[in-house]
Image: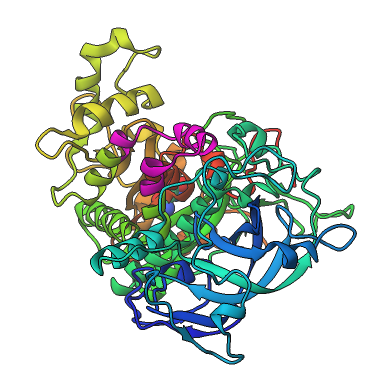
Amino acid sequence: MGEAIRSGGGDGDGDGQGPRAIRTVADLKEWQPGSLVSDVQVCGWVRSVRKSSSVRFVDITDGSSMRPLQAVVDKTLAAEYVSPRPGIMTSAAVRLKGVWHGGASRAAPSVESRGASLARSSTPGTQPSAGKPGPGDPTHSSGQAPSPSAVPGPPAQAEEAACATGADLGQASITAELRVSEVEVLGSSDPQTYPIQNKYQTPESLRAMSHLRPRTPINSTLLRLRSDAMAILGQFFSHEQFQQTHPPIITSSDCEGAGEAFTVKSGGTSDFFRDPKYLTVSSQLHLEALAQALGNVWALSPTFRAEQSDTSRHLSEFYMLEAEMSFVQDMDEVMDLAQRMLASLATGLGQRRASRELERHRLDSRDPAERLAFEDLVDAKELRQRWRGLMSPIRWPRVTYTEAIGILEPAAHAFEHKPVWGSGLQSEHEKYLAEKIGYDEASDAFLPIFVTQYPRDIKAFYMPQSERPPPQGQTVDCFDLLVPNLGELAGGSMREYRLAELEDNMRLHGLEVPTHRKARSNDMGWYLDLRRWGCPPHGGFGLGFDRLLSYLTGVANVRDVVPFPRHFERCDC
Ligand SMILES: NC(=O)C[C@H](N)C(=O)O
């Protein structure tokens, strides 16, 4: 929006900030001033153009809402913007100015002038008879298949409200729309070559053009939801008095020791950093250092794994949300934090536009292409069970690894890999456990589950031994958070805070134990230093942010919730 118009209405997107300037298409669509408002300006991209005998219906989007705004451009005015001049074409960037008609009834349109006064009778497109074209009417100026919105769709929120207003007054209502008097084409487009079509495109084909994919309605909504999630998490941790930090991306060691780190090289012949360095696989060790100075800390950082896993759950570059709590003795407190955080995130997202749109438009979509795109997502019923579980007031189930093996053993025939005490849980085991233990019949919800105390030999060197291990063998104080369909969403642990015990663990894991920190060394001397001077008991967790988003939205492949996915053999643009 070019002009800041103050809405007297609600806060628009549940951010609790009260009335605010109308800046976006989404704001405008929700704005019902009760009278016509002139000099309203919209900047955006043309999603589609439909023709009627006297006007052009131009659907405009600016990425702020899933459904476009309808702009009505008089045929003669639109004709000024045809070849060879840049035209009002699909995907062109435009600035439109005109009279906003949002929520007024047919019987009482009065113009509230803002700047240049606009007499209704003399303004093209302000006649109340405009409205949407009938089903037989739409034609497509771009020459492409009819757009989603060419089929008269369900009313968007503002339109619903507008209808309600008319009904309340016992008067007919009209579609909320901008009746355009001025057009400026800011960036022209050739719809014949534009690769995003107004028809169903598979997730795979869209992935092959990740630079254009965010322009599709569902993908742009997913990216807004991603942005909402970051904002809500920021609020959550600030409220919990955690400090947000920026741990390094280039590190001197591979924290988890699993040999999955990418090595950083410069173009020159010699090592830029003297020794080989790596892209971080986890910020945990650096967060531990920061937690010893700042108290509780968190970070949402890019993380890299050179795993050659070509699955729908793996990315080579992903965002990990990591939290580290100081002065914590009981791992339950760390798990409580993870549950509180996810409950607050789901609750917050539920009040935001992006998640509401995904839910509502899945139900009200009438466009076959959009319906097909929604069908790529996990079933709506299951999605509701996931959200109910995340927001549930019930404490999520906590079972030990040993108990989990006991639950898996009777179902061993159903698995490709036999569940055996001492081996890691396979993703098929994790999914089974999450569904079996996590389903709460009373609330028809999938509660995420914590599996705790894994065998020491299969876990990282920084995890402390459990005080009361099972007869099968030594375990460590750690947990994985499992959810249906996806398996592991987060992993955390207490950290071994005693120097001697940590050194023993390192030896057990075959790691070199340096005696002191050497400058410019790749060893773990600095990490051991943290245990020398005032290290309190502490613990934390790391959660795959992209996996979480795919769980929340029902997007089957984690590659479709990140704007530019990087995975085995693919790093396209
Ligand atoms: N911060 C964490 O606890 C995450 C853990 N280091 C991991 O990579 O799984």
Front residue of 51/22: it is 51
Q: Main secondary structure of the magenta part?
A: helix
Q: Quadrant of residue 72?
A: bottom right
> On screen, 123 above or below 362?
below
Residue drawn at point x = 80 percent, y = 43 percent = 192
Placement of the N terminus among the 4 image quadrants: bottom right
Magenta span: 359-383
Q: Residue furthest bottom?
A: 115
Regarding residue 503, the answer to whether it shows in the image is no
Q: Is residue 276 left or right of residue 248?
A: right
Residue drawn at point x = 51 percent, y = 54 percent: 132
Q: Is residue 335 magenta?
A: no
Work out whether residue 69 can be spotted: yes
**Residue 21 versus residue 442: which sits nearer the camera?**
21
Magenta region includes residue 380: yes
Seen as rendered, the residue at the extreme left is 442
